[in-house]
Image (cartoon, rainbow, N blue to C red):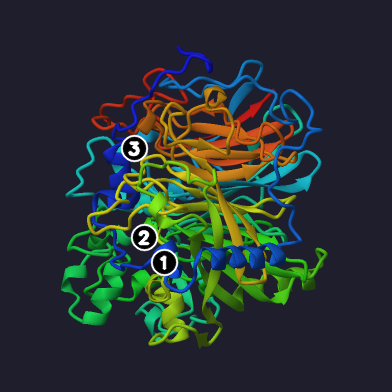
């Protein structure tokens, strides 16, 4: 296998993620026409009508002044120490297609939890061929994505995991997609949601234990709808005539840990769980459903056969009760989790919090679909320090009142320099400025023709009207814990280009963008201006369209489709990927410095098994946790013909799992 100094050109245009994964995770949404029909103008098209080049530079000066509290992205300091930055002293692993987790030399690994492992008292040991809904309600759920670790005692931690979706062809032998059984459907309902599990950490790798704090959240769990849209007629159903109590959560992708110790989780691809869209005749409702990609007659999983809430011809408001950011208090197993309407409804990847200098909290949010938008929420109230019951109760209400914004980006180079090839502009950097456009503040709408509750429930339509910037699948967005800069993974967008679609621009510089980019913001968290630059334009380093913050591309690991981002205590950025098959290899976890002479030096830390996606990384000094989601999901394979036997080996079925890695 080639070493880092022996570059081989990887296949830039392979198919990427398996179709079976696309089918069950998002209804093969990427193969459909993107549901954003707007022709919003961008960059030069939008602002060059009113600003000349000098005006754009003045706008940049305004942003620089407003963001003066943040350290500038500087050139590499002359005093930087030679050699690897702290926290990155490992030898990168090479791209591979092994049915295993591959870690650097000198590191060990161990499974923490697998799908089906019992986590509640009385739950049985996993039995693939004898699954029941009752058993799955007490077992670790399927397709673990986001992962969080919270403190308990010196030798105990609390782990929280999302369970994004189910791939029924891998859950059950002999599965018939056209005729699922009620037992199979109810197992799937129980396999969605979240798990809360106590880990013992004092003897090597973390070990899951039975504990009163352990909990499963499923599609049967009651939720409280809170915030400005709660109680809206658009949220009422026969099961909940008040519009304030939803049942269950699904397609939970990424998330975040709040400063007050709760978990935020994003409901993402909710659109293809519903049937009967073709029976809806009201034009306004049809438009709203279409904008969220909800279409057709029967659903993918046929759940409508067993519960009418999945049938829009009977309960047209049920989809409006999904697509939110949820908040869970993992320290209270009796608490009712919340869906926050003030954060808007769209295909949430997740949410992450930054505390502004004045004490208000700021949440950054991405809508994970082609040509969708980046959002921000700023609370009205300030966070109370401390862990008292009063402070905790107050802080858990912060996301119910504030202002929701959407982002518009402007490049600082002429639009003529962007032909879709990914070529750097003449100033040598993809960068510019931007503004946050207000959508609503509590009961006040800033979008003509839409009430505030309509803005919150149909946020995509509101963002369309204010001409937000169409992005290349905004996924995980996180503020840096030291500098405050904000980092956004833009996974890919093979539909970007001319021919009636949004063409390349400075923040999305490639047509047919199969490999994605990572965006870096200097944001004034309570103002409305920011500056931005692209940190990475991903892909094979031999591809001239790639960019690694100016670092020598012959020294970097190939990386594609950035999905989740995280930070270590030294300030390095870690990135997990989704669809590394676009480069002919397994997905993995990567790291790079953000400062000094090694800025942009991407190094692959590990790879996950064939067909799997690397999710939810946690980076600590002596421990890395990664979720390996949907291992073995390769076209042509299923539970009757598994191509992977990870993690148990032999002839076992593949099982999504959380992995611990340590030196």
Horizontal and vertical percent position of residue 277 = 21, 69
When asked about the image quadrant of residue 449, the answer is bottom left
Horizontal and vertical percent position of residue 242 = 45, 84
Residue 555 is marked as: none
Disc 3 versus disc 1: nearer the observer = 3
Horizontal and vertical percent position of residue 82 = 76, 24
The answer to whether residue 311 is above or below residue 140 is below
* Dot 2 crowding, Cα within 10 Å, few <14, some 14–19, many 20+: many
Task: Tell me which residue sits at (36%, 79%) in the image.
Answer: 237
Marks 3 and 1, the one that precedes in the sequence: 3
Camera-nearest residue between 324 and 640: 324
Q: Secondary structure at mark 1?
A: loop
Read off the residue under disc 2.
Answer: 270
Marks 2 and 1, the one that precedes in the sequence: 2
Read off the residue under disc 1.
Answer: 322
Is residue 193 visible in the rendered structure shown here? no
Horizontal and vertical percent position of residue 339 = 52, 69
Whether tag 2 and tag 1 are in contact, CB under 8 A, the answer is yes
Residue 17 is marked as: 3
Camera-nearest residue between 353 and 432: 432
Task: Tell me which residue sits at (74%, 68%) in the image.
Answer: 392
Marks 2 and 3, the one that precedes in the sequence: 3
């Amino acid at each position: 296998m080639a070493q880092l100094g022996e570059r081989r050109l990887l296949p830039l245009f392979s198919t990427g993620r398996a179709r079976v994964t696309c089918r069950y995770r998002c209804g093969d949404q990427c193969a459909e026409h993107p549901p954003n029909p707007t022709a919003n103008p961008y960059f030069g098209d939008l602002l060059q009508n009113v600003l000349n080049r000098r005006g754009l530079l003045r706008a940049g000066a305004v942003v620089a002044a407003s963001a003066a509290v943040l350290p500038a992205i500087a050139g590499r300091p002359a005093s930087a120490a030679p050699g690897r930055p702290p926290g990155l002293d490992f030898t990168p692993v090479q791209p591979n297609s092994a049915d295993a987790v591959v870690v650097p030399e000198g590191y060990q690994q161990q499974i923490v939890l697998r799908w089906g492992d019992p986590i509640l008292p009385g739950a049985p040991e996993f039995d693939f061929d004898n699954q029941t809904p009752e058993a799955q309600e007490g077992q670790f759920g399927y397709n673990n994505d986001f992962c969080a670790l919270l403190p308990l005692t010196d030798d105990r931690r609390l782990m929280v995991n999302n369970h994004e979706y189910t791939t029924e062809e891998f859950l059950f032998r002999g599965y018939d997609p056209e005729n699922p059984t009620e037992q199979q459907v109810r197992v799937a309902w129980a396999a969605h949601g979240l798990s809360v599990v106590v880990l013992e950490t004092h003897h090597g790798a973390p070990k899951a234990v039975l504990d009163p704090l352990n909990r499963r959240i499923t599609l049967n769990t009651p939720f409280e709808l809170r915030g400005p849209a709660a109680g809206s007629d658009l949220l009422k159903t026969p099961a909940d005539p008040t519009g304030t109590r939803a049942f269950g959560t699904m397609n939970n992708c990424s998330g975040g840990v709040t400063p007050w110790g709760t978990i935020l989780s994003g409901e993402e691809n909710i659109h293809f769980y519903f049937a009967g869209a073709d029976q809806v005749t009201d034009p306004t409702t049809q438009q709203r459903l279409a904008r969220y990609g909800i279409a057709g007659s029967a659903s993918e999983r046929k759940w409508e056969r067993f519960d009418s809430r999945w049938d829009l011809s009977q309960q047209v408001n049920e989809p409006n009760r999904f697509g939110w950011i949820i908040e869970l208090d993992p320290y209270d197993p009796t608490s009712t989790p919340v869906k926050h309407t003030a954060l808007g409804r769209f295909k949430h990847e997740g949410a992450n919090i930054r505390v502004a200098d004045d004490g208000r909290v700021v949440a950054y949010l991405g809508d994970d679909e082609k040509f969708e938008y980046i959002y921000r929420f700023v609370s009205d109230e300030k966070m109370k320090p401390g862990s008292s019951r009063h402070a905790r109760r107050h802080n858990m209400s912060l996301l119910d009142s504030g202002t929701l914004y959407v982002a518009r980006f402007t490049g600082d180079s002429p639009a003529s320099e962007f032909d879709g090839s990914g070529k750097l502009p003449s100033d040598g950097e993809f960068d510019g400025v931007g503004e946050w456009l207000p959508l609503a503040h509590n009961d006040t709408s800033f979008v003509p023709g839409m009430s505030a509750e309509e803005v919150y429930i149909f946020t995509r339509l509101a963002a369309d009207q204010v001409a937000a910037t169409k992005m290349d699948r905004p996924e995980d967005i996180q503020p840096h814990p030291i500098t405050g800069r904000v980092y956004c993974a833009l996974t890919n967008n093979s539909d970007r280009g001319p021919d009636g679609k949004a063409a390349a621009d400075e923040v999305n510089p490639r047509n047919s963008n199969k490999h994605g980019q990572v965006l870096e913001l200097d944001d004034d968290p309570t103002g409305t201006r920011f500056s931005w630059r692209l940190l990475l334009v991903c892909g094979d380093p031999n591809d001239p369209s790639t960019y690694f913050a100016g670092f020598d591309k012959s020294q970097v690991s190939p990386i594609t489709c950035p999905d989740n981002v995280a930070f270590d205590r030294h300030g390095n950025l870690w990135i997990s990927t989704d669809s590394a098959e676009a480069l002919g290899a397994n997905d993995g976890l990567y790291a790079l410095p953000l400062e000094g002479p090694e800025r942009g030096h991407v190094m692959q830390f590990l790879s996950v098994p064939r067909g799997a996606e690397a999710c939810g990384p946690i980076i600590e000094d002596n421990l890395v946790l990664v979720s390996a989601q949907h291992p073995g999901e390769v076209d042509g394979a299923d539970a009757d013909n598994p191509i992977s036997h990870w993690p148990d080996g032999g002839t076992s079925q593949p099982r999504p799992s959380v992995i611990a890695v340590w030196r």
